[in-house]
Image (cartoon, grey):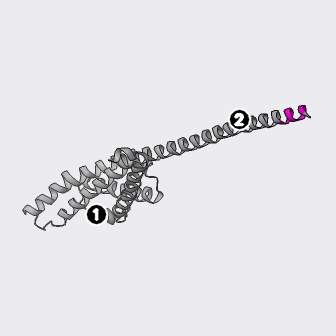
Amino acid sequence: MMTTLAFSSLGSVMWGGITFLAGIASKGIVDSYLRRRDDTHKFLLDKRLHFLEEQLSKFYWPTYLHLQKENLLWDRLKDRDQDPNSPQSRLSIQIESAGILRNHRDALAVIEDHLHLAGDTTIVEASLRYVRHVKVFEMLREAGLKDDPVSHGEPYPHDYFPLIEKRVNALQTEYDQLILRLRPAERD
């Protein structure tokens, strides 16, 4: 009977030790899983943040700024008089040759180099329509023609600026929110 009691006490001590070790091991496994999951999540957020930085800095903001300049320049061109020697007409001719054409070339360089960052088929399609319009505009001017590309089958994509503006704002908001999530200590 004494042996049974000793065996029973020894069994419960061993059982307690085994469950204790099993608890420690399972906690380690769960902690390791949670740590890996958190690390993976942070890694994915960091990748998204980096991609947003690329999109915004190399494609969306430069394109948006070129379109803003283009809008300003075209507003000035609308003031052109019929008299080619009037100051307003001479200014508009200078704006067209020095401002618009250079801005078009700069905008096309951004689009050609970074369109792959657009990440949106609607933006890609509108960008390609813009490229076609601008290229026809440039070819007409190089040929000495003052025709509008619209009369040659390449209308200006009036939806392009609003699409870019909407996308810039959405991506910038997402970027700002990710910064706050990933770097909360740096906020203050």
Q: Are marks 1 and 2 in contact (CB under 8 Å)?
A: no
Label 1: which residue? 148
> What's the magenta bit mostly, secondary-structure-wise?
helix
Q: Residue furthest right?
A: 1
Residue 85 in view of the camera: no
Q: Tag on residue 125?
A: none
187 w.r.t. 80: above or below: above
User: Residue 121, image x and y in percent?
Assistant: 47, 57
Please check the rendered image and state whether residue 4 is part of the magenta-colored stretch, yes or no.
Answer: yes
SS type, badge 1: loop
Q: Residue at x 42, y 48 (%)?
A: 52
Residue 122 lies in what quarter of the image?
bottom left
| Residue farthest toward the front in the current orientation of the protein | 2
- Magenta span covers which residues? 2-8
> Where is residue 103 drawn, in percent x and y?
25, 51
Q: Residue 37: image x %, image y %?
A: 58, 44
Which quadrant of the structure image shows residue 21? top right
Q: Amino acid at mark 2?
A: Leu
Left or right: 121 with respect to 154?
right
Q: Which mark is residue 21?
A: 2
- In x, y percent, where is residue 33? 62, 41
